[in-house]
Amino acid sequence: MSIFDKIKSALFGTRAEAATRPAAVPPTAAQPTATVASSAAPAPTAAPMQQPSLTPAQGGPAASAPHSAQVAPTAQAAAPVSPPAATGAPVDVAAVMDAAVSKHGTDLNWRKSIVDMMKALDLDSSLEARKELADEFAYTGDKSDSATMNVWLHKELMRKLAENGGRVPAELTD
């Protein structure tokens, strides 16, 4: 996995987890409905001799149609609902980063420092990792000038996060 993908996963991972949780609940709710429908099916076949003599009003074959209609809305109600994350709402990068810094428990300036940002996300912030990120972003400057590279990386990272579903404060993308 690329360094940028690791950063995106760390930032957008909460959104992805939220998308999978609600989707898992509806199929479980639909299972009892399917059981009810399958247990209702053997009842007419258990007494095959009675079916021809019953009229629809007496519970004959046509009477099962309203029961089927009752099962269908239940199954329809249990259909998976699109999770909020599926709507493509942008992730508030500043809020996620502020929470990560707070959780980290140290004074990290993620708004200015690529190193602090990576540390807050519990990612490798070594010079080698940053050089790899620079390669991913096609940095053409001198990688031995780490200060200049770091400033460029931070700005480019903010721009790329904005392009990929992040809501980044304007002052960080200029």
Image: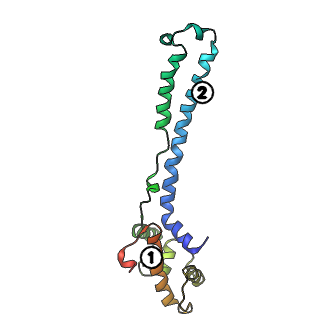
Where residue 107 appears, as percent x and y from the top left, is 43, 77
Residue displayed at 60% across by 83% down: 128
Give the amino acid type for the residue marked by disc 2 in the picture: Ser
Q: Secondary structure at mark 2?
A: helix
Quadrant where the N terminus is found in the figure: bottom right
Give the amino acid type for the residue marked by disc 1 in the picture: Arg
Res. 89 image quadrant: bottom left
Position of residue 42 in the picture relative to residue 163 (left or right): right
Quadrant where the C terminus is found in the figure: bottom left
In this picture the colour scheme is: rainbow
Residue displayed at 39% across by 78% down: 172
Residue 99 in the image: above or below residue 58: below
Q: Secondary structure at mark 1?
A: helix
Cα–Cα gap, marks 1 and 2 = 54 Å
Residue 3 in the image: above or below residue 87: below
Residue 159's tag is 1
Q: Provide the residue designation for mark 2.
A: 38
